[in-house]
């Protein structure tokens, strides 16, 4: 459960303090999940960006959903998406 709440908190913080839309969130997401937490690699981040752009909907929500799913499957995607939306 700790990891799920960490996902929620991370994406809540990113959604709350980022101005400029989904594309403005990409550098912050990159900094948090690659450099600080080392959850994914740079190559995986590029794949996530490509998938999020190709999927209908806002890119930030798509990225949060995908990263949450990569981390903790269904509940990770739910809580990461809720965090960025709130």
Image (cartoon, helix red, strand yellow):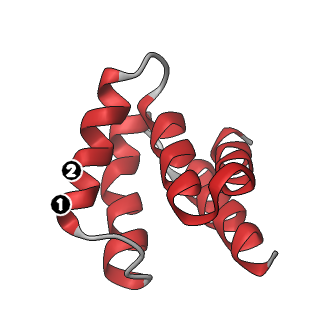
**Label 1 crowding class (10 Å Cα cut-off): few <14, some 14-19, many 20+?**
few
Rendered residue at 29%/42% (across/down):
49
Q: Quadrant of residue 5?
A: bottom right
Q: Position of residue 79 (x, y in %)?
A: 74, 52
**Residue lying farthest front?**
73
Left or right of residue 60: residue 82: right
**Residue lying farthest top?**
56
On the rendered image, what quadrant is the C terminus found in? top right
Q: Quadrant of residue 61?
A: top right
Q: Position of residue 18 (x, y in %)?
A: 49, 49
**Label 2 crowding class (10 Å Cα cut-off): few <14, some 14-19, many 20+?**
few
User: Residue 10, labelled with which disc?
Assistant: none
Rendered residue at 32%/34% (across/down):
51
Pointer 1 and pointer 2: residues touching (CB < 8 Å)?
yes
Q: Separation of disc 1 and disc 2 at Cα?
A: 5 Å
- Depth check, front residue: 60 or 62: 62
User: Residue 43, labelled with which disc?
Assistant: 1
Q: Position of residue 21 (x, y in %)?
A: 44, 33
Which structural element holds mark 1? helix
Report the number of discs.
Answer: 2
Rendered residue at 33%/73% (across/down):
34
Which structural element holds mark 2? helix
Left or right of residue 50: residue 37: right
- Depth check, front residue: 70 or 85: 70
12 lies above or below 39: above
Q: Position of residue 39 (x, y in %)?
A: 42, 75
Rendered residue at 71%/61% (across/down):
8
Q: Which residue is mark 2?
A: 46
On the rendered image, what quadrant is the N terminus found in? bottom right
**Residue lying farthest right?**
1
């Amino acid at each position: 459960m700790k990891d799920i709440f960490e996902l929620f908190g991370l994406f809540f913080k990113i959604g709350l303090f980022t101005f400029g839309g989904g594309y403005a969130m990409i550098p912050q997401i990159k900094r948090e999940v690659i450099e600080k937490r080392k959850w994914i690699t740079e190559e995986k981040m590029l794949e996530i960006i490509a998938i999020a752009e190709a999927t209908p909907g806002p890119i930030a929500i798509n990225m949060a959903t995908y990263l949450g799913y990569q981390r903790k499957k269904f509940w990770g995607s739910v809580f990461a998406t809720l965090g960025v939306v709130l």
